[in-house]
């Protein structure tokens, strides 16, 4: 039998009340810490991605990382539950969520073939605002007080960092085909944070993460089946396999788990706002690795982002 919460009227009402209200106290703090860890892992993946990308196509890379992540998460769930992984009730939920995330990954790599990372990064800053919209649409979460001003402040700081503090570069920003394609992927990712809470029926986060990973991986594999079949897997260098392993463990299984964990404890507007930390953390990583520090102007922009996020954390939930 599948994993089911007893779907009595009482249980349904309790589930809607329990999973669509914001957590309080320690659980909310854990949600914020989970998203800080999420941003740190995503930022750390950029250096790894730069090493791996020249040796393998994007569809093959994502298919491989999801395959490893699915197997790993399956083992973890099996060990934790001490029984076979339960088949979910209403499995279509995971196809919807997996489709939203697959859309993000597919459009991101498609867009990067048409435009530059700076432009895609600028489009990416729309995500917290879009997630606020979906939070209202699916969960009737209404941002209050400092939430929207904090998002704007953090977004301005993130854009400043992405463009390296260059006003001319900002003015030259042009919305082309690549940016438009990636926008739809950002919409998918923004909707995902609310869908996690909207579709959760009381499944443990590990189980929920496993089925979401599986659905996302299947959709990506179907999309990229031609490229995957044409890839010479036996000739891929060891460093690429090491990079795929890192991406699978930390920036696929790890980030999916952290995002779902936080989405069940925080409003959507606050969850994805932590993506603004990514460019700031990249600056820190690059400096610590000896690749040079950013200019004072860019670091100031990073400081504005952090200030906006601090205000966001302190703002009351919608």
Image (cartoon, rainbow, N blue to C red):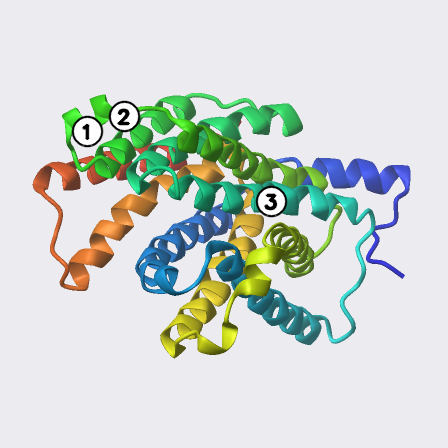
Image position, residue 157 (x, y; %): 25, 32
Q: Quadrant of residue 48?
A: bottom left
Label 2: which residue? 173
Q: Is residue 196 above or below residue 291?
A: above
Q: Secondary structure at mark 2?
A: loop
* N-terminal-most mark, 3 or 2: 2
Q: Camera-side residue: 225 or 6?
A: 225
> Mark 3 packing: few (<14 Cα in 10 Å), some, or many (20+)?
many
Q: What residue do we see at 63% from left, 70% from top?
A: 71
CA gap, disc 3 to disc 1? 38 Å
Say whether residue 23 is visible: no
Residue 99 place in picture, x, y as percent: 64, 43
Which residue is painted at 21% across and 21% down in the image?
171
Find out whether the residues at labels 1 and 2 contact each other: C-beta distance under 8 Å. yes
**Where in the figure is residue 86, as x and y percent of width and height?**
79, 63
Residue topped by disc 1: 169
Image mark count = 3
Q: Of the residues under marks 3 and 1, which one precedes in the sequence?
A: 1
- Image quadrant of residue 119? top left
| Residue 264 badge | 3
**Is residue 17 rendered to the left or right of residue 36?**
right
Would you place residue 10 above or below residue 168 in this image? Answer: below
């Amino acid at each position: 039998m599948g994993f089911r919460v007893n779907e009595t009227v009482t249980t349904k009402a309790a589930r809607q009340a329990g999973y669509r209200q914001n957590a309080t106290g320690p659980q909310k703090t854990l949600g914020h810490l989970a998203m800080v860890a999420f941003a740190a892992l995503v930022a750390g993946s950029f250096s790894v991605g730069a090493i791996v990308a020249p040796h393998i196509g994007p569809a093959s890379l994502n298919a491989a990382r999801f395959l490893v992540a699915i197997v790993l998460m399956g083992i973890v769930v099996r060990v934790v539950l001490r029984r076979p992984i339960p088949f979910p009730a209403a499995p279509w939920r995971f196809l919807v969520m997996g489709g939203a995330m697959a859309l993000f990954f597919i459009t991101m790599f498609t867009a990067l073939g048409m435009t530059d990372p700076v432009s895609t990064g600028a489009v990416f800053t729309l995500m917290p605002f879009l997630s606020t919209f979906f939070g209202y649409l699916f969960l009737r979460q209404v941002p209050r007080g400092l939430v929207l001003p904090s998002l704007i402040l953090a977004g301005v700081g993130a854009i400043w960092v992405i463009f390296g503090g260059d006003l001319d570069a900002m003015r030259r920003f042009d919305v082309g085909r690549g940016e438009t394609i990636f926008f739809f992927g950002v919409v998918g990712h923004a909707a995902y944070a609310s869908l996690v809470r909207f579709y959760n029926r009381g499944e443990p986060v590990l189980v929920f993460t496993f089925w979401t990973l599986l659905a996302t991986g299947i959709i990506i594999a179907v999309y990229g089946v031609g490229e995957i079949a044409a890839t010479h897997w036996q000739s891929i260098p060891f460093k690429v396999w090491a990079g795929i392993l890192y991406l699978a463990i930390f920036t696929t299984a790890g980030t999916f788990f952290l995002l779902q964990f936080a989405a069940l404890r925080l409003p959507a507007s606050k969850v994805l706002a932590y993506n603004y930390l990514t460019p700031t953390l990249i600056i820190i990583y690059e400096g610590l690795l000896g690749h040079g520090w950013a200019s004072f102007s860019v670091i100031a922009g990073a400081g504005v982002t952090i200030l906006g996020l601090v205000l966001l954390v302190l703002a009351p939930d919608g």
